[in-house]
Image (tube, rainbow, N blue to C red):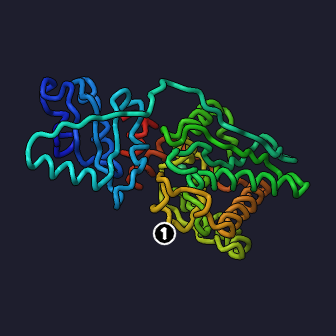
Amino acid sequence: MILVKDFETASAMKPEELAGRILFAQRSGGKGDRRLTFAHALEPLRKAGVAAILSEGRAPNNLPTAHTGPLRADLVAPLPLLDIGHEDAEMLKRALEQGPVTVEVINTSPISGPKSVPNVVADVRGSTLPDEFIVVGAHLDAWDFGAGAQDNGSGAATVLEAARAIRALGRAPRRTIRFALWGGEEQGLLGSRAYVKAHEGELDRTVVMLNTDYGAGAPIGWTADGRPEVVTRFQPFAKAVLQGLGGAKLGDEIRCDTDHCPFWLAGVPTLNLDVDISKYDAIHHVAADTFDKVNPASLASGAALVAVTAFALADMPERLAPRLDHASVLAHAKEGEVYDSIVFEGLIAN
Ligand SMILES: [Zn+2]
């Protein structure tokens, strides 16, 4: 095993120094260009015949996590990349101070090659503008350390509950509401990306995409991803109706880390359900993401917020906001400092 400062440094080493070795380093993850640099470091390591990469976990108390998730399986495979517990990593470093260390890596996760995963889609057809769409989505897949109860069982349940409630009204809104459960989000927004590609012809008529993927904390409101005009337009409704549900706060912070991103990049207005995430880090992508941590009242409030918002936007006489062209979207992305993430996710070419 070789201890390296980071994988970028290792990628500059001679191939013969790397062949057959296990690399151990603190992963230089995080946001933006650091992730991009990391991604670019992987290819030379894989080509040099590195046996495996051990990435030091950052969670306390040796908690195993799946925070290697957004690291682009297509760039890593078939090179095994394993997160190891923080305390185990510290022990390895102490051992390395004493002399060479040999590590046996037993990787029990099979690498299967490409698999097909479905999106699950259902419509409540609009009464007078059935060819215009409100898309209400959440990803259906989850990491398997826990049950994926909040990431993203709660989001999927929210979408199903909104669909049930709107159907139960017995009255269709003006526009079609399309409920979607995406496959393959954790591997790189695969389901939502495939949808946007396959439905290119409908995007001019897609009025807004609502996304829920930040856990089942108490709802706060919506964020409009760098579109202040969406916030302005939506504000009167939020004040009048969402206040009573505890979710009237509107923001315009840009995020591109979940399934709204392919829609946003295509210029479609997006709204992300904003919830209290103060307890989310403790359960996100770890064994603790189980149903007992879900507060039923918060989950129900979030579902009510999504259902009411979806119906209102589908039934408005005017559209919420226009679709933006590609150049305007890229300008927004650069202002919002998400550009490197978007390149990293492979959503646009570098
Ligand atoms: Zn998620």
* Quadrant including the C terminus: top left
Query: At x 48% / y 24%, what residue is drawn?
Result: 113
Q: Secondary structure at mark 1?
A: loop
Q: Which residue is mark 1?
A: 278
Q: Give the x, y percent position of residue 41.
A: 25, 35
Q: Residues within 10 Å of mark 1 (few under 14, many from 20)?
A: few
Query: At x 81% / y 57%, what residue is drawn?
Result: 165
Q: Amino acid at mark 1?
A: Ser
Query: At x 26% / y 35%, what residue is drawn?
Result: 104
* Quadrant including the N terminus: top left
Q: Who is closer to the viewer here, 310 or 233?
A: 310
Image height of 133 relative to 335, above or below: above
Q: Give the x, y percent position of residue 171.
A: 89, 54
* Residue 201 falls left or right of residue 83: right
Q: Who is closer to the viewer here, 115 or 273?
A: 115
Image height of 123 relative to 173, above or below: above
Q: Give the x, y percent position of residue 92.
A: 20, 48
Report if the beta carbon of the residue with label 1 is closer than 8 angstroms to ligand 1: no
Decide if residue 118 is in sight here: yes
* Residue 98 falls left or right of residue 321: left
